[in-house]
């Protein structure tokens, strides 16, 4: 099946594409929205501008649209228009969704797909958190923490690449502070810098950390593609 993908640049939307490709689907376009606030209930916020590099690394074209509101109904209308715009150029039959637990988000995206006679594909829906996080590492996904907003996750996690040792620590902290290990509750967000889908890895050249004492964001100011050789 030819598919578009809701794409945020994080581990989940990227791995959903990877899983769908392994199942034989062809991903022909990325659909990305750029909210101007981290209060959005539907959309991923940090480092959306850098998804353009990820699009180039995967050699998959991207349609991207800024959104100036956090009202879910207006976000949904803008997403609907973005899907219609993408369909005028790209011939796809369904859309990949990288959600794991949010029924609210899945229902909204499913409704958008039905309006546009598309099938919603959710490859990582309800995956076991620990198994899923280990699966990411086993399949050579390199990703950093781009935001934190949970007890147990302080500013030292911002910009950190997650490997096996970091995952062990996250498992310990998730039990102690009762947050979702896969961050599906918004406890943290991520940005993929390399994976099997990428022709080139992403090198972060310049960045800023913003920390208010409770939550924080890792902002990628400058990055470039490097050869994977």
Image (tube, rainbow, N blue to C red):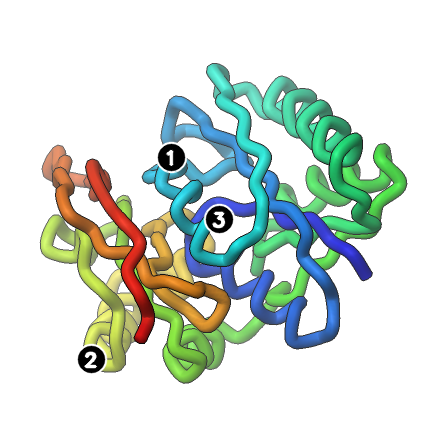
Q: Position of residue 60 (x, y in %)?
A: 57, 51
163 relative to 133 in the view: left or right: left
Q: Is residue 217 visible?
A: no
Residue under pointer 2: 165
Residue under pointer 1: 49
Alpha carbon of mark 3 to alpha carbon of mark 1: how far?
A: 11 Å
Q: Identify the mark at residue 126; answer none if there is no mark.
A: none
> Which residue occupies 14% across, 36% down?
210
Seen in the picture, residue 169 relative to 193 is either above or below; the reply is below
Q: Earlier in the sequence, mark 2 or mark 3?
A: 3
Q: Do the CB atoms of the residues marked 2 and 3 lie less than 8 Å apart?
A: no
Q: Mark 3, mark 1: which one is toward the viewer?
A: 3
Q: Residue furthest right?
A: 117
Seen in the picture, residue 180 relative to 31 is either above or below; the reply is below
158 relative to 128 in the view: left or right: left
Q: Identify the mark at residue 55; answer none if there is no mark.
A: 3
Seen in the picture, residue 205 relative to 41 is either above or below; the reply is below
* Residue 11 sits in quarter: bottom left
> Which residue occupies 10% across, 55% down?
156
Crowding around mark 2 (Cα neighbors within 10 Å: few <14, some 14 to 19, many 20+) is few
């Amino acid at each position: 099946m030819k598919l578009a993908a809701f794409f945020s640049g994080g581990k989940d939307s990227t791995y959903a594409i990877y899983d769908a490709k392994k199942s034989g689907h062809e991903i022909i376009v990325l659909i990305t929205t750029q909210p101007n606030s981290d209060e959005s209930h539907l959309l991923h916020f940090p480092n959306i501008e850098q998804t353009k590099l990820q699009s180039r690394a995967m050699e998959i074209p991207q349609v991207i649209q800024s959104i100036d509101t956090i009202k879910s109904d207006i976000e949904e209308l803008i997403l609907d228009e973005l899907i219609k715009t993408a369909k005028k150029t790209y011939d796809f039959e369904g859309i990949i969704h990288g959600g794991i637990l949010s029924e609210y988000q899945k229902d909204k995206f499913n409704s958008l797909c039905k309006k546009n006679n598309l099938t919603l594909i959710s490859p990582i829906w309800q995956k076991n958190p620990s198994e899923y996080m280990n699966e990411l590492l086993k399949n050579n996904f390199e990703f950093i923490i781009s935001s934190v907003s949970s007890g147990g996750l302080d500013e030292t996690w911002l910009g950190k690449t997650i490997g096996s040792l970091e995952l062990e620590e996250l498992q310990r902290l998730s039990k102690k502070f009762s947050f979702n290990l896969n961050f599906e509750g918004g406890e943290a967000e991520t940005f993929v810098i390399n994976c099997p889908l990428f022709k080139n890895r992403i090198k972060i050249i310049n960045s800023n950390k913003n920390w208010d004492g409770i939550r924080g964001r890792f902002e990628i100011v400058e990055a470039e593609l490097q050869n994977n050789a």
